[in-house]
Image (cartoon, helix red, strand yellow):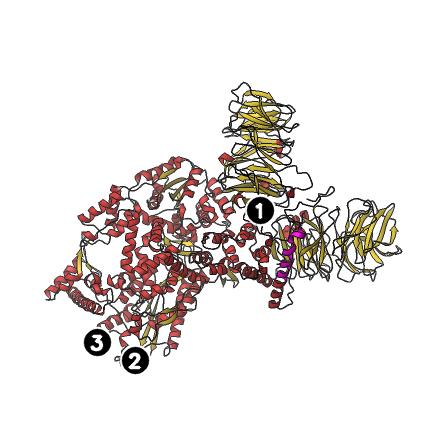
Amino acid sequence: MSSKLKDSILKGCLDHLPTLNSRVVRIFICSTFTDTREERNILIEEVYPKLQSYCKQNYGLEFQVVDMRWGVPEEASDDHSTSSLCLAEVLNCQKLSTGPNFVTFLNQRHGYRALQQTIPQKEFNQMMEMLRSLGEDLAVFDAWYKEDINAVPPVFVLQQISSIIPSYKSKDADAIKKWEKIAEEMRSKLKLASQKCFDEGKMTEEEKHKYFMSVTEEEIEQGILKSPGNPLDHCLCFVRIIEDIHNNLGHSKVWRYIDMTGNEINQESQTLLNQLRENRIPKIISKDKIQTSLVKWSDKEGINREDHKSYLERFAKQFYEGVRSLLDKSVSLETELSKDNLYIETLQHLTMAKERCSMFHGRQDILEKIASYLREGEPEPFTIYGPSGSGKTSIMAEAARKVPFVYHKDAVVILRFLGTSPDSSNLRRLLRSICSQILYNTVGKADDIPEEFDELVILFQGLLEEYKSKKPLVIILDSLDQLNQDHSSYKLRWLPRKLKPNVRILLSTYIETLEIVTNLKAFFSPKSFIVVPNLGEELGFQILKVWLEGSNRTLTSEQFDIVQKAFHACSLPLYVKLVFENILMWRSYTPVDRCVLQTTLQESISTLLGQLENKHGKMFVERSFAYLTASASGLSELEFEDVMSIDDSLLTEVFKFQLPPVRRIPSLLWVRLKYDVQKYIVDKEIDETRVTFWYHRQFIEASQERYLKDEKFAAEIHSNLADYFLGKWFNVSKPFRYTPEQAKKYGMSTLDSSADRKVAEQPIKFIYRNKDGNPQIRFNKRKLNKLPYHLAQANREDELNSVCLYNYHFIIAKIKATSVIQVISDFYYTKKGKFNKPGVLEKVLKSCQTTLQQYPDSLAFEICGHMLSYLTDKKPSSEKTLVSECLKVSDETKKPIPYITCYSVPSEALLYKLQNHKLPYGCMNVATSKDGKHLVALAENNLVFFWDLTVGELECEFQALNPEDSKLNIMGSESSKDLVYFSSTYQKTMHPFIIVNIVTSEIKRSLNLGKSYPAVGMADSLKHGLTEQRIFCLHKGHSADVFSMETGQHEHSFNISADDMVISPEKKLAVFHLKSTTTYTMYSATSLSELHRFDVDGPSLSLIFSPTTHEAFVLLKDSGQVHMVNTNKDDGTVGQVLSKISASDGQTIQEAKMSTSGNYLILRTEEGFLLWNYKSNKVFKQFKIPNYIKPEHRVLDMFSSLQMDDKTFVVGYEGYLVVWDVAKGILKACLEASKSKINFLDINNARNLAITTSKRNNAIQIWNLGAMEKTDSRFQPLMMKTSPRYFDVSKTGETAVVRGTVANDVVVLDLINGRIKVNISEAYETMRPVISPDGAYAVLREYDGQNVIKIWSTETGKLINSLPLSSLMVKHYTCSNSRVLVKSDTEGGSTFSFWNIKTGENLHHFHINHLNIGEVILEMTHLDDEILISKNQKGDDVGNCDLLLVNIRSGEELYSLAGINPARIQPIGESGYLFLAEQTEDQEHYLVIINTKARKITKREKTSPMPNSFISLDKDGNYGIDRVLNLYDLNSLKHVHQFDAEESEVMLRNIKIRATAPKMMPNGEFAVWLNIREGLVKVGNVKEKVVQSVFPVHSIPISVSVSTRGLIIVGCEDGRIMLLQVPDYSMDTKDRLALLANNITDRLVNFSKDVYKTSGLNKTIKRQNKESKVCTIT
């Protein structure tokens, strides 16, 4: 049966739906009130919090308690609704709760007996007739019960107390006594009448008993005696008997514990109670299951904490264990279906649809159009849209019901009312749910559904594309606007554009969501839309009558007239619904002047809110709806109760005349109010929590206007919500003041008091253990997402900064729980006008959001690396506190800490840095949409990336073509249509041509063109042009062809050999330049016939059309001129030169193009640019590149763009963005965008953006042209003029010498102070530097010359010696503190010479008769007179040599060792005589340790794998690491681990030289290496053998080194030198942190004083670096 049921539900059938359960534990507490105060108090204080935690942590359930016995407002008693509300809530608990749903405390009080709120007409008349026959006075009934013939059948209604006794509402004592007397009279007479009627057989026992039973008994009857299912599985019963209560009947408080009439026990009540407790309940729950406690009376209040401590503790334990046992049992006994999330989710939506359908009428025209779409509509989604409240949801429900009747009886219907359930509020979960349902209906199971969003989109669209079932698939998604906007859901990139014939998608949205409607209309044809109109007066009236009939109600004729007039003014379905809810309260005796209907929807909502205020209390409704609306997305039941329980203004009003047992808002209040607005609110999931929120936008707007218009009050509401999410009052007594009435009534000596409100804890994350006992983390998304918003709206700036925006633990938790975008959004929606203007942190997060999302644990390093200089601030600030906190976190987690500032803080100009390691370096295939909101880029393996430029977030990616078929490497754009196209020069098997819409990320065409060019070469050898119907393709110098845009079929070949092609702006002309000629041919793009040929005055570089196409501009190669020629095809003078354009200063024009506006020609010369007004044939403006950014080398290319409004001119020159104000002709900004050459520049006019890429990195930078300004120098990192390529660090760890990628860029680093000490070698082009062990000298070799070995003082930067050695001879060099050792090749052998490092004097030399081929060994030993050298001869294996220990004075060989790999030898430790080497013997490889002092191998071991490269060792020689991250224990000479094993191939491919090879830290605890491709620095823990830290470089890391003082030194492509430190963990933590902060501050202060002096960053001074003629490393 369950299998058939599941099949039916998951097929979308609305017939025979089972009851729906929810994921809450909701328990109704039933008892009399006055006798259970102590029990209730201990439950609230101790038990409920434990159960909340147990449910949440073990089962993910929300625990709720409904206790209706205290805090009952006068409104509830005034309208006699308390009893009916309680019974409704019992039913609600039975419907919703998992496991236990009802607990009763049945003691010795029968309790209050309520009058019947309504009595059926027949029954009432019968009893009145009986009383009349008994001679009773009926006047009281005539006054208090009125007949309502609007009820069908009619009833008599008990009147509201205050309608007859007005002072009752104000708690007037006389009024209360008066009502109690009247009520008792009516109760007595109704009991008498019902008993007589029963005795005479005119009334059943059940009908009679309702006039005798108490409210508690009525609840027990519903909760236990008539409980659906087995009460033993859902109910608990506790009985407490005070054994000696009969001996204490004289006590003033005894009435609280037993029913009394005067001074005697009410025997009637006791009889009824005993019958219930001893007979009726035990028939359902056996006595051994009833928890019974016997206690003694206490003179102090009867029952109290002191005298009954053991009983109360036992009771609390029994309650906790009882509830837990029922819950555990319920969960374990849950059927397979009840555990099936997909089944539960689907059932929820079907249940909602069935409810909607039950009230649906009319709209046949819309339903018929939907049916027509299902049967024969366009193969794309169909959308209905209209104003909020126009009835779209009901239409969608009815459409779902009718699918089997109007389309196909076996159709699979997948229905989701978006935003109404956990799996329909978030796009990722929605797609996962839909995919699961499709798979269940196609393959019978839904296993292996991916979690990642991008994978889900691919699966969803793939399932629809491949859907082959004979049962058609219909997906119905109501209210797209109710989706939250995660994953850019409103952009609809997840939605298929085309559908198979057996797949249909029906959508709805409200018309006000412009983004959704606009996107839908961009995707789909007009035929696929229908607007939902108003109902109309007649249909609205018909529907209302049907609804009334279904509710067993009607109206008087006068009341119907009032409704008809109202519908004439407004007939929106929501308005009709509001009218219906209003008139349900109209009695037939309601005066006509009180039957008022508003004529607009907003007025109707306002009236409803007013009625609710009158019914439930103005303050309570005002604050309830204020909290609901201020929440912005909803609150859970617990959140509602908790936040209102800390609102003392509200509690003071609620408890004005009462003293509550616990100072919390009574559950009943919200239950009553929620019940009255249940049709206008919805339960949905937000932040993994089930919350309640308004369903209709009009209610949100009306509530905002009514309750939150006053800024002061709104701030108070937000402040209370902020306090709640702060957890401010968790486990803390909150102060309050008693009311004077309370003080007087209860004899308070003071009004001041405090109380624990028992609100939920609000940690940033919950830590619990899973079933295996392992700790797990669940982030508190409610706090993370709501707290910043409410603090901002409450104007609590300091807390907003300290707790959220500048709090490390908050930021990282939110990144991990949500996204970096969400963190950045906290800065956006706060009130920037008042505070929190965009600051450094916001810019930092934006610039590194891509890497932070992937490596969130790098947050502390990112913040310190960017913002370290805040530590120098003398005044406290949020930024300074955050940086200090990040230092502490890094220290606690033993992660490297920035030694100085590592990153530049982006200026206001840099909006985003879009990074992805799959993008190629210097990516040029980039385009933006017209509106500037989307960016597309072509990456490796035919991947296409789309970014949302409004937030800088990756929207989606897809593979446009299988790389095995062809490699896409050509991209072009049709910007006016938001299209890009991709093609390839790799055409051995096909000629791909793919057209994509940038806005929708939709592939519009995927063609294999009918002719391919297998011999095509570079990407620029192929050129494409598009018209409306055709694709023109030029294979330069070979052929020109035309293809169909629709099919890709080859249509035409031009019989020409051309090297350039231009399509005219209006797409009517195709112009070709004939190869090796001066001739252009002009063809019709429609008829393809030749129109004209014309010659120009020499070889040309390009042709550009004017906007009218009547003129064209030809750039001539030889003269460097531009000729404007006539191209008007209707004019006989085509080709005639109209004017000649030359640069006035004699410069050659190198490039010409038309401005975006079409008003100017942009002409590039060697010096800059000219804006040429071709209409007036004059130079409009001239812009010269500033001298101070010009390099010494010739610049061959630069990029330019003039904005559409002709006001701003932007140039990409080398690594700079240069911006001019066109009107004023002045330079606005000159910003260094990159250390490498800008490779691409584009301008988006709509959003005033510049988009750049650079040659040597894979980032796309997005610039705001309206904020081009200089970077704040205080955030400057350590920079070189070029990229730091080679490091050599002194053994003292205090000094390093660095050479950049340009051979004359060499600096000396002061590693103690973290600054560049001096620049050296600017006049010389040198090779890799060497530093003396003490750091006093730097030795470099020139590339060519006679005196090529140069020795500099690292202190003064002066050249002190040049050694007379020729560049042709010098092969290797090294140095000690006193000597320079040089190996030179001489005729027939090698010479080793030794030079005094201070004087340059040649000390001695020796010669050996062999040459070295391949790697050279040149190592000094512990003795000044001995060195290690290598020996091999031409023809030998260069991977093996003889190792020689030689006396440097005599040249004598002291010791030799064969089979040594010259690339694998290095000293071990500090001894100077131990060396690690790799030896080959009999083709076997060994690791060996050589002792030159003992002149022997002291250890030799075979290990697998052998090192792949030179091994980096720690200071003591305990561990080493090779280039593929193999870790070796040098004490055993064994391989012990490989870090990042999956990256070994990448490391092998990218790590070619020692500068980029992994390094072992001196202490042997950590290893550090680079992931060059992804731009990362990684640190591995040697002991734990795990990757401990990952740091993004935000550039390409090109070198890494370490110092003996524990510094990690990283060279970056953009010129930065990153210095990271590993603290000394042997120090006390407090002392260590203080020392860290102080040292960093000192370094930064010193660095800021000379940052421009030494680092070459001053843009106002012309660059001094000389470009190398010999070697520039890229």
Q: Is residue 381 above or below residue 160?
A: above
Residue at which label 3 appears? 262
Residue pictured at 43% horizontal, 43% vertical: 515
Residue 1066: image x %, image y %? 50, 28
Which comes before the other along the chain, label 2 or label 3?
A: 2
Residue 1099: image x %, image y %? 64, 26
Residue type highlighted by circle 3: Gly
1 vs 3, front mark: 1
Residue type highlighted by circle 2: Asp
- Within-10-Å neighbours for mark 3: few <14, some 14–19, many 20+: few
Q: Is residue 1252 above or below residue 742?
A: above
Q: Which residue is most to the top? A: 1132
Residue 1069 forms part of the magenta stretch: no
Which comes before the other along the chain, label 1 or label 3?
A: 3
Q: Nearer the viewer, residue 1438 or 1274?
A: 1274
Q: Which mark is residue 916?
A: 1
Q: Nearer the viewer, residue 1503 or 1117?
A: 1117
Q: Is residue 719 above or below residue 525?
A: below
Q: Secondary structure at mark 1?
A: loop
